[in-house]
Image: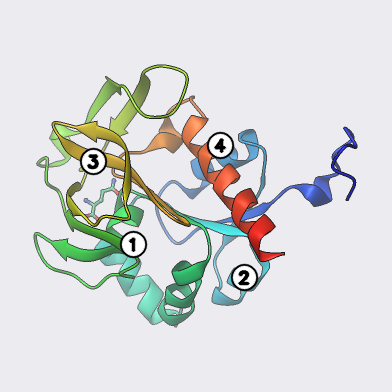
Amino acid sequence: MDESNPNTTPESLPCIGVLAIQGDFDAHAIAIREAGAEAVLVRKPEQLDDIDGLVIPGGESTTFLKFLERDGFLDRLQAFVRTRPTFGTCAGCILLAKEVTHPAQQSLGVLDATVERNAYGRQIDSVIEEAETKLEGGPMELVYIRAPRIAKTGPSVKVLAERDGFPVLVEQGHILAATFHPELSADRRIHRRFVDLVREHSAVRS
Ligand code: GLN
């Protein structure tokens, strides 16, 4: 494609899958489209072959695991997240972590971090905060719902935002993870960051 051509065709948009097993996958799909990519809902493991990146939404990580195991999805997903751009929010972040505590639970083990489930209490403690992040454009609204806490990160993990001294938005190579729900805010900076990551990754691959 001619990069100097301002008439960008729909074909040039990266295609990002949103895992549509549970959680607010529709809100993520809308956010991805507003951030400048194509979004498809992923319900079958073979769809992973046709996407440039994947969003794993929030929800309940234990339920996610049950569905993924039942559908024979887990192995394909595990292989995908090892090398392909993936953005996990809340339960999605829990699934990506190398270690999960409170209680310990199986995970995809690709984000070099220890994540503690429900670290801020029960549903009633869910909260919306304004916080500074490393992304340009000033403070951002962060929506926490039964949020996990990233208790520990490895050296290759970049921290993009914190809450009470703990990371809440992190990046590690092709992985982006948030303990909050950016799809529930109008601000699209985080989804744009993921679309950029997918574009960079696709450029390296081709
Ligand atoms: N508490 C949920 C879990 O442990 C995550 C909450 C969320 O995704 N909003 O899986």
Give the labeled residue for mark 1: 96
First along the sequence among labels 3 and 2:
2
As shown in the figure, which amino acid type bears the numbered disc 2? Gln
Give the labeled residue for mark 2: 47
Q: Position of residue 101 (x, y in %)?
A: 12, 62
- Which is more foreground, mark 2 or mark 4? 4
As shown in the figure, which amino acid type bears the numbered disc 4? Arg
First along the sequence among labels 4 and 3:
3
Give the labeled residue for mark 4: 192
Which mark is on residue 28?
A: none
Badge 1 density bin: few <14, some 14–19, many ≥20, Cα 10 Å: many
- Which is more foreground, mark 3 or mark 1? 3
Q: Is residue 39 above or below residue 180?
A: below
Q: Considering depth in this image, is 8 or 202 the residue closer to the camera? A: 202
Q: Is residue 105 left or right of residue 112?
A: left
As shown in the figure, which amino acid type bears the numbered disc 3? Pro
As shown in the figure, which amino acid type bears the numbered disc 1? Leu
Contact? badges 3 and 2 (CB < 8 Å): no
Q: Is residue 92 left or right of residue 167?
A: right
Residue at x 33%, y 70% (from the top left corner): 108
Q: How many marks?
A: 4
Tell me the CA gap for discs 2 and 4: 22 Å
Q: Position of residue 129 (x, y in %)?
A: 26, 23
Secondary structure at badge 3 equals strand
Residue at x 49%, y 78% (from the top left corner): 76
Tell me the CA gap for discs 3 and 2: 32 Å
First along the sequence among labels 1 and 2:
2
